[in-house]
Amino acid sequence: MPQASLAQSSTQSGAQNLPSVTVTAPEARRRAASTAPRRAQRPVQSANNSKPQPQRNVGFVETPRGPVHGYVANRSSSGTKTNTPIMQTPQSVSVIGAEQIRDQKPTKLDEALRYTAGVRAGTFGADTRNDWWLIRGFKSDDIGLFLDGMQLFYTAYASWRLPPSNMERIEVLRGPSAVLYGGSSPSGIVNVISKLPPAEPIRYIEAGVNNFGNAYVGFDVGGPVATQPQGGKQDGKLFYRVVGEVRNGDTQVNFTPDNNYFIAPSFTWKPDVDTTFTVVASASKTDTRGINFLPYKGTVTSAPFGKIPTSFFAGDPSVDKFTREQEMLGYQFERNLTDDLTFRQNARFAHIDLTYRGYVGNSWDNINTATMGRYNWYAKDTANQANLDNQLEYRFNTGPVRHTMLFGVDLKGYQIDDYQAFNFGTVPSINVFNPTYGTNIPITGAPFRNFQITQKQAGTYLQDQMKLGNLTLVLSGRNDWVETTQAARDTGATVGQRNDSKFSGRAGLIYNFDNGIAPYISYATSYNPIIGLNAANQLFLPETGQQAEIGVKVAPKGFDGYFTASLFDLKRQNVPSAAPGAIVTLQNQTGEVTSRGIELEAVANATKELKLIGAFTAYHLFNSKDIDPSVIGKAPTNTPELLVSGWADYTFRDGPLEGFGFGGGVRYVGASWADAVNTLEVPAVVLGDLAVHYEWQNWRTAINVINLTDKIYVASCASESSCFYGDRRRVTASVSYKW
């Protein structure tokens, strides 16, 4: 199996510095929840008024699609698909807001997840192609990525990429989520919330460059559009926003650029206080090269010559390329039919066209002469995905019990043209200290994958959030019907077809004591209709999962922050596994992986100057069933079982240093394994990050450093011949202006 398949299966706009009231009007609703009072609609500032507006004495009103106040989010929709306080959600939820993204300056989505409990971000180190993360020990970037509540599924190489510059918030829901979202990761999802049109003008531009010469410029503009009055009465309100970014330049690996182009226009129409219709579009392009697949000896441990330089490029710049073109168009519609009944419909169509070509490292040909073998690789994947989610929310009382009932029907369609080919023994070896480039050898022979795969999924779900005093009970159920077809692209012949019907359920109970302590318990099941053929050339069965979780959430009175602790027992079943000595593609679904652990998280706006984040994750991850008895009880590769992190940011609000601030963080990533039987250890690593920033009038300058000590380390190994260096020290200087 090609090693390339083993690794498959930025900047912030600063708009949060505007008055907080500006972001609430596009999301204004007659009733935010069954108990929420009716809110008056705020007046909209004229679009032709270019003068900066003063800060208004208006309290911050949080919505699940809006900004986070500092680092502390109080509400989320990912766990229930309703506007629910996190303290009343009987499941683990973490929210990363735009201010945290701005302070830490991630260039990729997975970098923004580094300080989140339960998440191992950047699994494959300094990889510019994709975002990678594990949740509770399970790979979740392929089936656990959601944008605005709708899945961005991928298989083979047709992966999506979302820039942090267009993220209002990132919500991490840990534990099975199929009961609301259908086929997804049993360990949880990452739901990115896009920036949406604001009610007051945003004018923002930012530029920066790092020590590798990678520079960027981004912008964020938006606000109201004046509408023509009819009969002396204004006919509705229209808002817009356009977020864009261009990033070009080198990285720590020779001949590996990180070039990205992105633009995202959106429009919101509010004909009245009860109706909101938003159109969201985006287009992006990525131009980079493939990741290095390096051997264990020479990266984790020393070879006779020492270690491979982190700047070494194992491919050939005249051959290698990794390009992605990605487009999306969708809408979000919400209508309050009555004070107690709300209808929502969200839809999106997404298209991706990806080409991956290059020479891939394939262990040592001669370790004594530092000569590495390579093979020839080519992948061409084109995919389309359509999502439609209909929701009807009804709020009512039965005696003393208050109900928030949610009924939904969603549809998902996915199709991929997957072409992959490789040749062994045709590409010359390469010396890691004296590489020779310039040889272009074409791929020959038949591809090993040449399929068109289609998957259609329809689901219906019902949820009731029942609140009796301080007690909240959440019951959810869903059934899905999935049809999967795999056909040969060259002949059109159907290789495999199957239909599945699966029920998912969840029950959760949480009690909110008056002192801010909220213990909870939950149980949930999940499934994932994976794509692929087993050793008998039949389509795989869906994976299934179950999780039991108990925990406590603490939000002390008078304190802007909260603490959470959770214990979980999670099983992932129907996992494809191969017999000893068999090639990876000849798999049967005899595997089961168990993850049991504890997560602790603290988030606080401790004072008006100080913001804090802390996370601790420890779990025991092991193969509880497998066709290969030698791996039972062993941990999968790439997977550390201990993660600890902490981040703080302090900004002077008064005195001679007003506007000056600094922050920093420490991340501990525990040891992992490079082989299935756990004999080759990848050591743990401690990394430090730093931020220094200064705000003056409408300007903001910042210097951000990741891996402050320039620690050379291996992020993980998928196998003995597939190891990946982590990020070297990266220093980014940026300046921004808003008006």
Image: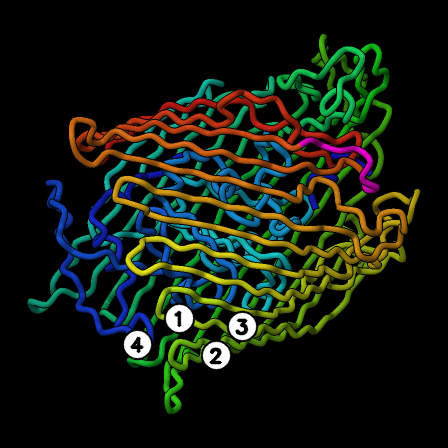
Residue 164 among those drawn in magenta: no
Identify the mark at residue 513; answer none if there is no mark.
1
Three-letter amino acid code of the residue under disc 3? Gly
Nearer the observer, 446 or 246: 246
Task: Give the crowd class for mark 4: few <14, some 14-19, many >=20 residues within 10 Å.
Answer: few
Three-letter amino acid code of the residue under disc 1? Phe
At horizontal 70% and vertical 13% (from top left) the residue drawn is 437
Residue 678 among those drawn in magenta: yes
**SS at badge 4:** loop
Distance, label 4 to label 2, CA atoms, is 16 Å
The residue beneath circle 4 is 35
Name the quadrant containing residue 684. Answer: top right
Distance, label 3 to label 4, CA atoms, is 21 Å
Query: Do the numbered discs 3 and 4 sit on residues whose CB atoms are within 8 Å?
Result: no
The residue beneath circle 3 is 508
- Magenta segment main secondary structure: loop
